[in-house]
Image (cartoon, helix red, strand yellow):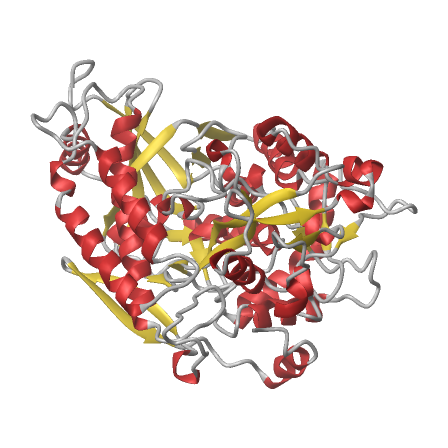
Amino acid sequence: MSEQSISDFTRIETDVLIIGAGGAGLRAAIEASDNGAKVVVLSKSLLGKAHTVMAEGGVAASLGNVDSKDNWGIHFADTVVEGVHLGDWRLAEINAKEAPDRIYELEKYGAMFDRTPDGRILQRAFGAHTYRRLCHVGDKTGLEMIRTLEDQVLHRDIKVHDETVVTKIFKKDGRAVGALAFEMRTGKFMAIKSKAVILATGGGGRLFKVTSNSWESTGDGFALAFDAGATLMDMEMVQFHPTGMVYPPGVRGMLVTEGVRGEGGILLNSKGERFMKTYSPNKMELDARDVVARSIYNEIQEGRGTEHGGVYLQIHHKGAKFILDKLPGMHSQFLEFAGVDITKENMEVAPTTHYYMGGIKIDPEDNQTTLPGLFACGEAATGLHGANRLGGNSLIDLLVFGRRTGQSAAKYTKDAQPADVSENDIIEEISRVTGFLNKPSAVNPYELINELRDTMSKYAGIRRTEENLTTALDILLKIKGRYSEIGVAGNVRFNPGLIACFELHSLLTTGELLLRGAIQRKESRGAHFRSDYPKMSEEFKRNITWHMEGNEVKSSFSTMPELPPEMVKIVGQVEGHTQ
């Protein structure tokens, strides 16, 4: 390193280290701090710029303000049924029961929700929800959530390091005890000693070429946890949102909120046909995301797509005032990026990689992973959404389980003793990081990232087959075999190429487990669609878990606990909504 010695690093000590500053990480930080823990937050992006801001349509909670019959039981049942019975019923129960309190808490923090005429929080319809349940702030709900939580964090004694990349979770005596990171702005390394570590790093949508995810979503938390010895689960389960922009090319994949359909938007093919009448005559545009996404994909594949390879989404029939009141963000997004006025013209949309249902396996009661001292929440964790996530359940997941994880981690630290990481271990990791710099004849990491994304998009998207998945895995393993060859010029400071070296590892880990899981799951369930096994199989009503044994990737099947009889009765009220 040119600007510092390899032994030049800062030691930081805290009770709880939180990696990720989206909605889940910030809510966890608030709760851990309020429970007496000293908290440090590391953010790959700038504070306030997390991927959460790109969630637009709303946050799910059974307030019953618009549909008075709604209650936690129906929300719970919708979650279980649309997850196609692959999720953990206990997580779904906790989420549904605690959701209303988290919304009112956020309101107390200062969130400005849209209102009914009598002043209550307004709720809109969303796909596969039995009732109108989505609390919203126009079509900028995630942005308002981050603004509100960030304000709470800044008014507490919580230290935030933004533009900081974490490269390794340290372990000692079989538990997580901290991490190594470096600041992009300064190039300085930080060795953080902590009693507990929370991963709130989001998902891995950037594994695909066309995605609604922001640049940070490269599966970093998955790889950090897996490398540290934690178990991952359901990695084949990736949600493709039905509606992303398709034109112009520079914004392809940018999210078009489900709120458009929730407010009455309809889907049309190039012949002007409302094709969802054929695929889902009862729910039409408001069926589950996997159903609508596959329907759009099918229309395009069969030659009824638009000029730019999508279908039409129409909302202008609702009138300009309605659109500007309800969907101001969508209006400006299409006008600025595509030159389309959605108060007069149709939008062109197509499916886009959106959300990772799979992730780090957690205990439903405290969100601790299989590695003691390591916790996970938000999109980084798995179990709540099963094989298909309900729209709006991601944002409530952040609030409910962000809070519970912060509380659990703070409680854990009361009995945990701090453990020192040796200077040799720290210097060894710093040496690994700087080893990517200025290597002779190095392979550009972006070259391999682009090849990986092309491969995943071509062979492992909405429609999967054994042949395609096997082809993709062969290519991925060849890319993985070249990982030791990558390198970049320059030093640690302001070096996006160096960050790409770590992102490639994260993407390879995420992609390999996705492909291996998709090959093993010889059925179609939720977002995982195998055209060579188009039906759901009772044999695969099981989760696929992943762990490391030495240098070998190992899998096993596990089954979520069966629903208790009283829960079976609740689920029976909405059963039949799935494919």
Q: Position of residue 566 (x, y in %)?
A: 64, 83
Q: Nearer the viewer, residue 281 or 484?
A: 281
Where on the picture, by quarter, is residue 503? top left
Establish if 109 lies above or below 2.
Answer: below
Foreground of the two, 465 or 423: 465
Q: In the picture, which quadrant includes the C terminus?
A: bottom right
Q: Residue at x 37, y 29 (%)?
A: 164
**Residue at image x 40%, y 75%?**
523
Residue 447 visible in the shown view = yes
Residue found at the very far top of the displayed protein: 3
Kindly identify the residue that appears in the image at 62 percent across and 26 percent down.
Answer: 336
Looking at the figure, which quarter contains the N terminus? top left
Residue 162 in the image: x percent, y percent? 43, 27
Residue 34 seen by the camera: no
Give how far across and how far down residue 518 sits, in percent: 34, 66
Residue 296: x and y in percent read 55, 57
User: Is 211 situated left or right of 550 in this image?
Assistant: right
Q: From what the image shows, is residue 312 above or below residue 67?
A: above
The number of numbered discs placed on residues in the rendered structure image is: 0
Q: Residue 142, located in which quarter of the rendered image?
A: top right
314 sits to left or right of 407: right
